[in-house]
Amino acid sequence: MTEFRFARRSAILGSSVFDHAPGTISLNSGAAYPPLLPDVVREAAAAVGQHREEAMQYGPLMGLNEMRDEICHFVAADGVVAKRHNVLVTYGAKNAFDLACRVFVEPNDRIIVTRPTYMTAIHIMRTHNVRFLDIGQDEDGFCTRELEAKLRRLEANAEPMPKLLFDVPDFHNPVGVTTSLARRQEMVALAQRYNFLICEDDPYRRIRFEGDAIPPIKALDTTGHVISLGTVSKTLAPGLRVGWAIGDAGVVRRMAMQKADGGSNTFAQRIVVQLMRSNRISHHISELTDQMRHHRDVMMEALAVHMPEAKAKAPLGGYFLWVELPEGTDAERVVELGVFEGVDASAGRLSFPTDDPGNFLRLAYSFVGEDKIRRAIARLGVAYRRYKQADNPA
Ligand SMILES: Cc1ncc(COP(=O)(O)O)c(C=O)c1O
């Protein structure tokens, strides 16, 4: 047997990433709801017909100009003022964040994150060998006071100061909370005072079920301290792999120079340009929002019936429920038992950059419909009771 000399980062996280028995219901990832994936046959035909050479060729590093212009138009509705030179088109928001890390982060640099935060962002940051400066959240979202105290302490001890902050301010993944306007303003003030950049990852912003939208952090930025990471993965289809970064022109140009992809998928960009121009994207978002609201409600009801011990706060938008099991519960073990019952959930551990309290689950209601959500939560309830009986008889 060959003894492969793997890098440490290749260790597989989570036990159920690849293999599931047929019939397993997945609440694991924020995948799109299949019946609502847009039909883009017409747009794809135009892309490889009228725009054949463009769609089949390596593209410009910054993205297609028409795509960049459509993105400026799309975010203007949120109060973000961007010109073409501020926009870099990428293979999704995750790729944009990785490019930002490549431009700013050296090994052992600190990145400010919430505790917990988006699991794939943790994965990306770990590949850059960063240290985390983790900050809590309350019902108003990101705890700026805690951040300020930690920054002051670092400064007083003449420690290296963080260069980046990563956050999901709207319908946070995994917690679901939305950061208030006042906290967003404080975040920008701290970024200016301590000269770090905020990477605002906002894929769920338009999928709001209730309440009024709060301006993006990028809309409050007058000094270039915010990079806004966007994507069509949640508003259209993740398979398109089209996202963007909006920031200072010099910053996004450096990010473009870090690309190793020959200019990001021009075929998909041309499809998205058409969907944005015709405004099909807005109609799609409105239909999707209604569907996701319903999924959220069904999952909340099912939890109350099948897992009354679990605590979850209904998010006002987005794709996930963040579920707290009674203190001391080993959520990872509950997830493992769930796999035997035919449900695949995510243990909270994957979302904690540092210490995991151990008793949280992240459940996506985006991918499966009403019936499967009910069945999946019933199965998870069985797994939880098995856990209590077998593993934790007290
Ligand atoms: C917080 C967050 N950012 C970004 C994304 C999407 O990334 P991408 O645009 O690369 O598909 C997701 C999807 O799960 C997400 O939850």
Image: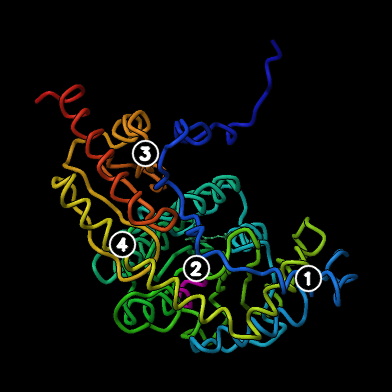
CB of mark 2 near ligand 1 (< 8 Å): yes
Eye-nearest disc, 3 or 1: 1
Task: Choose mark 2 or mark 1, whichever is in front.
Answer: 1
Residue farthest to the left?
Answer: 394
Residue type at the position of mark 2: Pro
The image quadrant that residue 299 belongs to is bottom left
Q: Mark 4 points at which residue?
A: 296
Among the two numbered marks 4 and 1 on one chain, the one whose residue lies closer to the N terminus: 1
| Residue that badge 2 annotates | 203
Q: What stretch is highlighted in magenta?
A: 191-195
Q: Main secondary structure of the magenta part?
A: helix
Choose between 282 and 185: the one closer to the eye.
Answer: 282
Q: Is mark 2 on a helix, strand or loop?
A: loop
Of label 2 and label 3, which has the lower sequence position?
2
- Discs 2/3, front: 3
Check disc 4 and report its element: helix, strand or loop. helix
Q: Which of 337 and 357 is in front in this view?
A: 337
Q: What element carries label 3?
A: strand
Q: Calculate the distance from the C-alpha at mark 3 to the C-alpha at mark 1.
A: 38 Å
> Badges 4 and 3: C-beta atoms under 8 Å apart?
no
Image position of 392 with respect to 324: above or below: above
Residue 85 at x, y percent in the picture = 72, 83
Q: Is mark 1 on a helix, strand or loop?
A: helix
Q: How many numbered markers are drawn? A: 4
Q: Which numbered disc flags the more N-terminal residue, 4 or 3?
A: 4
